[in-house]
Image: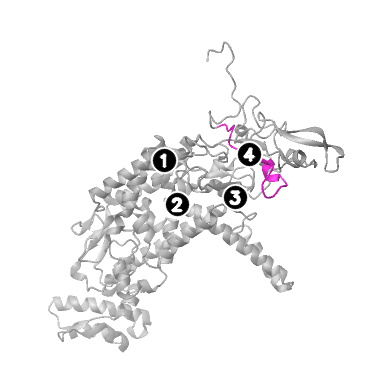
Amino acid sequence: MPLTMMSRDQGYHVAACLRRAMREALAAGVPCSASLLDCREGIPAAFTRAAVRPSASGTLRARPDKVSRRRAAHSNLPLSGPLSAKLNPAVRYLTLAKLRRYSQVVFFALFLFLLFKTEFRGSFRSAQAEIRLPYPISIFLQADPLVAISNAISTRALYQGLLWSLAILIPTFFLGRFFCGWICPLGALNHFFSSWKSERKRGGARIESNRYKRWQTLKYYILIAVLVAALFGSEILGILDPISLTVRSLGLSILPGINYGFNALFDALYRTQVGALRFTADVLYFLLKETVLSFKQPYFRQGFFLGLIFITIMILNLRITRFWCRALCPLGALLGLVSRWSILGLEKHPAHCEDCNRCLLDCQGGDDPIPGAQWRKAECHLCFNCVEGCPESGIKFRFFPGTLTTVQGPNLQRRRALASVAAGAAALPLFRSNTGLAAEYHERLVRPPGALNEKSFLERCIRCGECMKVCPNNALHPTLTEAGLEGLWTPVLVPRVGYCEPSCVLCSQVCPTGAIWEITQAEKGWVTGSADRNAKPVRLGTAFYDHGRCLPWAMATECIVCEEWCPTSPKAIYLHPVEVADAEGKVKQVRQPSVDPERCVGCGACEFACPLQDRPAVYVTSIGESRSKTNQILLKRPQKGSGS
């Protein structure tokens, strides 16, 4: 290519190559002018002035300015000959960095697609067969190595779908923390918000913020604590697991908020009575109804606080790049420990380094890729930003690299590690010495159908929110105090918001850990014709009446809404006519409802439909649930001669 036909980016690229050629020529004893004549001819003066500058000692040296370095590092120039040989490493790493960006976009889009599809948009009444979602909704959670390991530790077994975690764990042994930089949806969001410019990350402060800090070991101590807690039977790591946190935050807070905002916008456009604006609302609704918008507006308890926590994590990226990933993420800590044995690593060549610090500008892990410092292998996210930004090829990723300047694993202090073990071991006794599990069991803690007994449930539930997101009636919500501190954000049925659909078992299908055991419609036993006559239906609880608020009981007013909504066959709510006197002394007949506890399954339809808006006259408690042998209202005596 004639040099006079080069573009501006190509000129900057050649200017960077001049610098490298000058250094090699000087080392070989060739005069500077001779090494420049063949390359400088025809290059615009702006490029050559940037490329060749006198040093402090007066010697002529190639010294690209800041713009030249940036252009040379980011341009993808097709050249041939000696220059192309020098450019190939930069082009290769530039391509890897681009592939990493594409990978982040693709996997985050896949994550959002599956999250949007965690919803049933059809009709249960028109369904001819058992309803199943057509996509692997929980695949990101099932592929989470931390979820798999903690589940295996807490239950002494491994739930079926969690074997997918090997697809992440095994490559990490060979490549390092590729999941953090290439796949993790929360990592992609943190990476995106970290790229925003802020006053806290400018100039030298930005470079210094990307150096390794001792507080980055905090995530390893968190990992130790949650794994020890899992060993004693508590799955509290779900609060901090990045995939669980992202699903819970987006599914129960951010997306419902976006859905509400769009619906408010559509209503506002329609109220204007302007045809063009109404048409715009129709077009937007058509484009978004199958993706962003929910079939109906969901509402969740704790939604504001879940969203506030998530937004705070995003905002912290404006101060420290990927703060969550560096300081708090237990999954990143686990993968960092595993990456200790990876054969892919960073090799540094200090002789080629000109101390430009470009490798630190966009470092995501804070792993000190700069030559002259020890590279922290366990902190690297394999973003390749450092090698992409290096104009001198002073750092390179390669298999089986030299390890003289590499710190293989985290540098943990023994006392702090022991303190983490003690904290994890003490967590469970402190949680369970409180009320909520063994004493003062909350009467409104109604779990989803298929949920294991409470102790086993807490050993498995990771608070991901998948069951709450998929519930078609918006009946499942995250707990606050109902299950004690150990059960924070686990699912609970709130009948006043929604009831359990008789033919629905979607929550058991999407649960990634088996806290809600997968059951079929026949095993649930709430639909006539699909249930086994000899099998008992799954019971969530029992309905009770407040006679002081029930209209037929307290006010001599006819009301049979609860009986009409009762889905069991025969109905668990029955009516008995009685004669009562009204306020004027007139005698009239009303039908008063009562509950048959043998038939009631605790679905909550009666409570949902009760016309008393502030506090219903009929309510469901957990007494009588199938998953517990002791939380029962009907205790049958053993028959004589049964031997028990």
Could you tell which of marks 3 and 1 lies nearer the N-terminus? 3
Amino acid type for the residue under numbered disc 4? Val
At label 1, counting other C-alpha atoms closer than 10 Å, the crowd grade (few under 14, some 14-19, many 20 or more) is many
Is residue 453 placed above or below 17 in the rendered structure? Answer: above
Please give the residue where the numbered disc 2 appears in the rendered image.
243
User: In which quarter of the view is residue 363 placed?
Assistant: bottom left
Give me the residue at 33% from left, 81% from top: 11
Expressed as whole percent of the image width and height from the top left, the position of residue 306 reads 50, 55
Give me the residue at 28% from left, 65% from top: 211
Label 2 with label 1: CB-CB less than 8 Å: no
User: In which quarter of the view is residue 557 placed?
Assistant: top right
Image: magenta residue range = 605-626
Real-space CA distance between mark 2 and mark 4, rounded to the nearest whole angstrom? 33 Å
Please give the residue where the numbered disc 1 appears in the rendered image.
234
Could you tell which of marks 2 and 4 lies nearer the N-terminus? 2
Could you tell which of marks 3 and 2 lies nearer the N-terminus? 3
Please give the residue where the numbered disc 3 appears in the rendered image.
119
Nearer to the camera, 443 or 388: 443
> Where's the N terminus, which quadrant?
bottom left
Expressed as whole percent of the image width and height from the top left, the position of residue 517 reads 52, 37
Amino acid type for the residue under numbered disc 2? Ile
**Left or right: where does residue 348 sit relative to residue 267?**
left
At label 4, counting other C-alpha atoms closer than 10 Å, the crowd grade (few under 14, some 14-19, many 20 or more) is many
Determine whether the residue tagged by mark 2 lies in a helix, strand or loop. Answer: helix
